[in-house]
Amino acid sequence: MNQSSYPLVIFVVSITVLLFTIIRLKINPFVALLGVGLLTGMAIGMPLDEVTKQLSTGFGQTLGNIGIVIGLGIILGNLLADAGATEQIAVLLLRAVGKKNALLAINMTGYLTCIPVFLNAAFIIYMPLLRDISRKTGISLVALVTALIIGGFATHCLVMPTPGPLAVMGTLNLPVGPFIGWSLLVALPPALLGLVAAKYVAKMPEMQIVESELETVSVVQDTRKKPSGALSLFLLLFPILLILVGSVAAEWLPKGSTERQVTAFFGDKNVAMLLGVVLAAVLLKPFFRKTFDELVSESGASAGLLTFIVGAGGSFGAIINGSGIAASLVEWLSSMNLSLLMLGFILTAILRGAQGSATVAAVTTSSIVAPMIAAAGAHPITVGLAICCGSMCCSFPNDSGFWVISRFSGMTVAQTLRSWSLVSTVSGVLGMILTWIIDKTW
């Protein structure tokens, strides 16, 4: 084996071992990423003290950039869900467009709600509402489910503060405001594809949900007071608007001016998310079923493991960079005329299909390609968007989300493969096409 191909072989072996440990050995991705990172550094011939240094440095740098936002984002989503604000957003949109356009309202509800709220949680919250809408309007339940999950999955995979896009942003060191703006734009066509697919599957007899197949979950009628739809939507979008306004203002205001410093402060991702959480905690307090401390504690439990996985992904990426594997990959890409954009998309899609988690796939790929961007002359934002689009693809039964959707909607495995796996993959490809167009016209 010649010297130039050895790093590439080590890279392929390390990815294979990583997937084997996660899929076959059922080892948590946090431990798997750290362990395989150590073995990769040793196999490539890095000094042992350098291996341990890169491991800790990569972990610290990654979490130093996005750790606070992960925690605050999960807290905000938990506050909105507990207060009933997520349901009120759906009611607001339904009232705005009318019951005849219920599919559009549900699709856009998913698109907006899943910016801070995890898709699985949002889907479970909305299922009783979808069944009620189906009964009152006669719209196929599977159509409503498809419109919701595809609309929600687009922003879940593309728009921070959900962990996948947040990790991509932090690992690739992307500017927050522009990345959010482009993410919202790129996520819209894939989301709307869910609306088109919903109308298509509604006409297919084999896609109708049989009543006896519905998940038998006792639902207690929720008669408590809830926040208005307008307030709920405002609290959902408030931190994102702060970040976007701060980014735009920074481009127009004079450097060093007090105004620019103030807008940059309030537009900082950590400050904006903290203010969003504080505002939601104050304005939604009358509607909480649990205390604020309980909600924060629950959010911390959810954020803990995700934060570890994201940090471990940074460690793995630091090993890939410090070992020289990244430089060898750049040379190989140049010889194959394969863009970093396509590598990011394809690798993420493969990792997603292999081990099931969109977040783990995005974290792993971004940590691999981050050190290659400058050498390849690629645009960091479009590479990040491509990775996020790749994480939308290939959701199979090894994905926990697959079973949440199937179980709570009452769809069979075959129906879930059609309405969820196939449509979400096509949505990811559509997002990638739009990203490629943006990259070519940059």
Image (cartoon, rainbow, N blue to C red):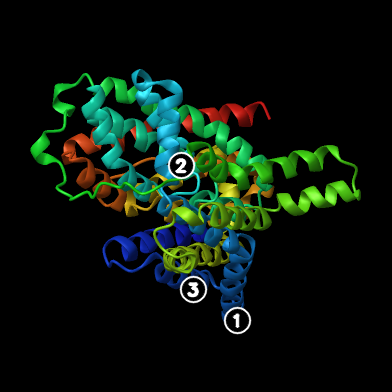
Vertical arrangement, residue 334 with respect to residue 279, above or below: above
Front residue of 202/371: it is 202
Sequence-wise, the earlier of marks 3 and 2 is 3
- Residue where numbered disc 2 is placed: 113
- Please tell me which residue is depicted at 35% across the width and 25% down the height of the picture: 103
Q: CA distance from mark 2 to mark 1?
A: 45 Å
Residue at disc 2, secondary structure: helix
Quadrant in the rendering for residue 69 = bottom right
Q: CA distance from mark 3 to mark 2?
A: 39 Å
Q: CA distance from mark 1 to mark 3?
A: 11 Å
Whole-percent x and y of residue 198? 31, 25
Front residue of 302/35: it is 302
Q: Amino acid at mark 3?
A: Leu
- Please tell me which residue is depicted at 56% across the width and 80% down the height of the picture: 48
- Residue where numbered disc 3 is placed: 38
- Residue where numbered disc 1 is placed: 49
Vertical arrangement, residue 50 with respect to residue 411, above or below: below
Residue at disc 3, secondary structure: helix
Answer whether residue 275 is visible to the viewer in this image.
Answer: yes
Whole-percent x and y of residue 294? 43, 68
Sequence-wise, the earlier of marks 2 and 1 is 1
